[in-house]
Amino acid sequence: MRVTPYWLTALGLYLCTCGPAMAETPAAAATTTIAFVGDIMLDELPGEEIRQGRDPLAPFNEILNTADIRIGNLECVIATKGTPEPDKPYTFRAHPRTLKVLKRHFDAMALANNHSGDFGPGAFAEMLDLLRQQQMPYFGGGHDQAQAHTPLLLERNGLRIAFLSYNEFFPRSFEADFDKPGIAWSEDEQVRLDITRARSVYHADIVIPMMHWGWEDERMASRRQQQLAKLMIDAGADAVVGGHPHVIQNTGLYKGKPIIYSLGNFVFNGFTDKVNNTGWLLRMEIDRQGVRAWRTFTADIDKSGTPHPATNANESCWERGQKEARGCAR
């Protein structure tokens, strides 16, 4: 007899219990599910796992495959060239073989973070070419500043969704320029303009920025994170999803739109404290009005950097109309 994993049972309950209370007209009934995960670092031990033929993302394969769109933050450069930044204590460069693993589990990668440029603009440009060859869409980075700030548009179930990605954790030298490849830097007025253009120019139904922000190991979002999240929602974002602190942070709600400040780590080795080895997979359900519901699935990360679905974890759930997130019903 097959025993259903706890997280899969919980996913079934989540899908089954949200419907009747949230009935909508047929015109608005189209929904799309998106799975977001935090920092994915494929150098060091995760990269060695892949070199030996193992897949560090396999434990989450079933739940990732229940989503229409799967998004992760790529917290390294994937390249063969370049030299490490001399002033950084940690620099990450993964082998191109890791791309096949990413392609197996994800539909797009966010690139705007403080490790994408660890081996210089040449290595970053090589990664862009490798991602394109692998037919792996990306956002938050490009061969120049215009590309880095162009939204990635994905259409599922009749919904046109724009994804943007920004970093505001130094070094800023990784920022793309008019003639230099790099990432999208978080400049308030530029972010506001990008979100506005995602709707007016690119005709997106839904706009979701992914942020690389906050202070490492801080469990609560800073005033800056809260201020910027409100700015993005005021500009037209339907939700804000963040990462970087290497821990899970609190969640929020502004004008009825959810803010997930930090998903924590997902594939990452080198941490000893449990708080750093705990992350979230965020499963979000959207329709034409925005985010309809979301819930988290907790990942326990082992010493090799591989995430495993946690058992008996206290998950968070939210549905449209609630004033705050609640614990999920078992």
Image (spheres, rainbow, N blue to C red):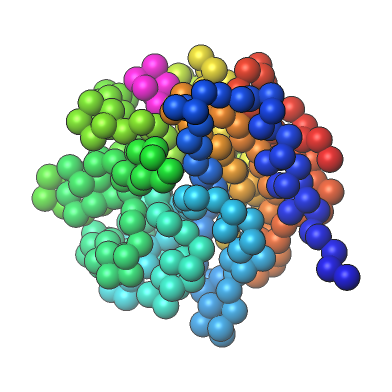
Locate residue 114, reporting x and y percent.
Answer: 40, 49
Which of 114/241 is in front? 241
Q: Residue at x 59, y 43 (%)?
A: 283
From where the camera sits, is residue 45 visible? no
Q: Residue at x 38, y 75 (%)?
A: 96
Which of 242/309 is in front? 309
From where the camera sits, is residue 254 visible? yes
Task: Give the main secondary structure of the magenta stretch.
Answer: helix
Direction front: furthest residue: 26
Count of numbered marks: 0
Locate residue 228, reporting x and y percent.
Answer: 43, 24
Q: Is residue 5 above or below residue 242?
A: below
The quarter of the picture where the C terminus appears is top right
Is 204 left or right of 265, judged from the image as shown? left
Say if the magenta span includes residue 236: yes
Say if the magenta span includes residue 90: no
Direction bottom: furthest residue: 52
Is 305 left or right of 181, judged from the image as shown? right
Direction left: furthest residue: 179
The quarter of the picture where the N terminus appears is bottom right
Is 320 left or right of 194, judged from the image as shown? right
Locate residue 53, reporting x and y percent.
Answer: 56, 83
Q: Residue at x 36, y 31 (%)?
A: 205
The image quarter containing residue 94 is bottom left
> Which region of the structure is painted magenta?
232-237
Q: Residue at x 56, y 24 (%)?
A: 24
